[in-house]
Image: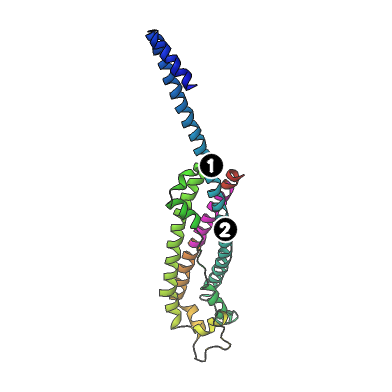
Amino acid sequence: MFPFFRKLRENLLAKNRASRYMLYALGEIVLVVIGILIALQINTWNEERQNRQQEKGIVSTLRQEFHTNRLVLNEVLTRLEKTRKANIILMDLFGRPEDRITGVNTDSLIFESLEYTRFVPSQNALEDLIQSGKLQLISDDRLKNLLYDWTRVMGRVDEEYSGMKQKTEEELLAYLTTRYPLKDMDKYGVLNWKESSRLSIEKTAVFQDITYENLIDDFLYRLTRYINTLEEAGNIMDKIISSKDSIVH
């Protein structure tokens, strides 16, 4: 085809048909421009197709990660609910008669009241997505906003856990260390002591102390906030998983 155009151009020049040659030259330019535009469009289509394939892979990986994290969160919430119930029972013992208090296994109850779990989700897929800059490949704006919400809420989760842990170590355990035999509590933990402490101490006295009641009340407040924030994180997870279903399938 190109030899034909060259020959045609030579003939036009030989016959001094300048106007026709200019028309031919313009036609050549138009054809070249059209060819470039078609090539660019094809390249855009290919790039878009590759991006969508990448998006499906990213979303699929995120979906699996959040599904696994949801199962872990359910276990953590189950544990924390047991801890909350133990603290509520403790609160009911303050100021009660001694026979009412001795009718409860306070060793097991106090041990249970201090047993709580930290939620540490796997975030490898999400962190890789953010650090690589591939978050923009996700076309669903709602999903991207949910991922941002998840990051924000997890920041609060970590802050609330740290505050609760500090409260336990610096105040609650410090209080009990001088007023209650920890060995008796640890019979129900990993130490699994077979006998109680041989030291004489009046266990029921702590339930007549406003300091201990205030410590438990404040801890229960922090624990409840931690649980509520985790439940908020769970709701975001459910929405993310649901949103991803619509994309992957």
Residue that appears at 55% across and 59% down: 69
Give percent across and percent down for residue 130: 44, 51
Q: Is residue 74 placed above or below 194 in the rendered structure?
A: above
Mark 2 or mark 1, earlier in chain: 1
Q: Which mark is residue 52?
A: 1
Q: Are marks 2 and 1 in contact (CB under 8 Å)?
A: no
The boundaries of the magenta stretch are 226-242
User: In the rendered image, which residue does mark 2 sit on?
Assistant: 70
- The structure residue drawn at horizontal position 48% and vertical position 30%, both measured from the top left corner, is 39
Q: Nearer the viewer, residue 166 or 59?
A: 59
Q: Position of residue 134 (x, y in %)?
A: 46, 47
Q: Main secondary structure of the magenta part?
A: helix
Circle 2: is it few (<14), some (14-19), or many (20+) Cα within 10 Å? Answer: some
Q: Residue at x 46, y 21 (%)?
A: 31
Amino acid beneath label 2: Arg
The one nearer the camera, 43 or 59, is: 43
Amino acid type, label 1: Arg
Kindly report the distance in space between the C-alpha atoms of the residues bearing marks 2 and 1: 26 Å
Query: How far from the left and from the top, in percent, is residue 240?
Result: 55, 49
Q: Position of residue 187 (x, y in %)?
A: 56, 83
Q: Secondary structure at mark 2?
A: helix
Indicate whether residue 158 is drawn in magenta. Answer: no
